[in-house]
Amino acid sequence: MTTKVSDVLGLPGEDEFTDFDLTEIQIVLNNLASIDAIDLAHAELLSQQSLRCADILSEYLAKMVKTVSYLEGKINSTKNKISLEYSDPTAPRTTVEMKKWAGESSPKVEGLQEKLASAKGTKSLLEKKYDIVIKAHHHYKDIAAGLRRTILGYKPGATEATAPEGYE
């Protein structure tokens, strides 16, 4: 089975980012907040879980970059189209400023700007969660490395002869 970038990024245009499933991420973040790594296996499990969350979040972030870019382009094109088509119904002449204001104050543009603001907020939320899970991954990875050194006597780069018996 092959996986293409389009399978990850989704369809062209905007994604329905409010439907992104953050359940697994929230479960892991709650675990990270309430569970201490008491042994090597536990530290490695928490490190793996946080790395899995980072993977999920990286896919969502890619979709958010696409969605934000799409909405910004759509706002510009909608604003320009409305500005070009506007003519003052009460005056024989329409000024450039009137056209510009018509494009900027259009309800269509306002709706798109609200969507864009929501998309940017979502992107910021996902970036902060990504930072947290990456830091947690490195934290638990360091704990696991420390436990290996102290409990198992493991030293990276050491020869097999120096490893404790049973841990070769």
Image (tube, rainbow, N blue to C red):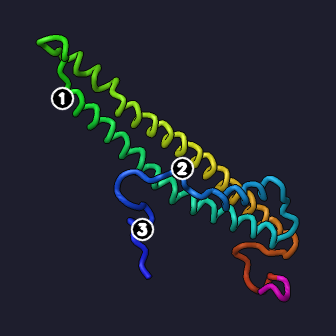
Q: Give the quarter of the figure containing the C terminus.
A: bottom right
Q: Nearer the viewer, residue 12 or 36?
A: 12
Residue 120 image position (x, y, % from top left): 49, 40
Q: Looking at the image, which residue is at 58% across and 49% down? A: 126
Q: Quick check: 26 above or below 151?
A: above
Amino acid carrying label 1: it is Glu
Q: Is residue 34 visible?
A: yes
Which residue, given by chain and number where applicable, does mark 2 sit on? 18
Report the side of 145 relative to 2 (left or right): right
Find out whether residue 30 is within the magenta segment: no
Question: Mainly helix, strand or loop, the magenta region?
Answer: loop
SS at circle 2? helix
Instruction: State the CA–CA distance, disc 2 to disc 1.
Output: 33 Å
The answer to whether residue 10 is above or below residue 112 is below
Give the residue at mark 1.
Answer: 85
Mark 3: secondary structure? helix
- Quadrant in which residue 28 is drawn: bottom right
Residue 133 found in image quarter: bottom right
Residue 7, disc: 3
Residue depth check, mark 3 versus mark 2: number of the one nearer the observer: 2
Horizontal side, residue 72 vs residue 52: left or right: left
Q: Give, as a single range, the part of the protein colored magenta.
A: 164-168
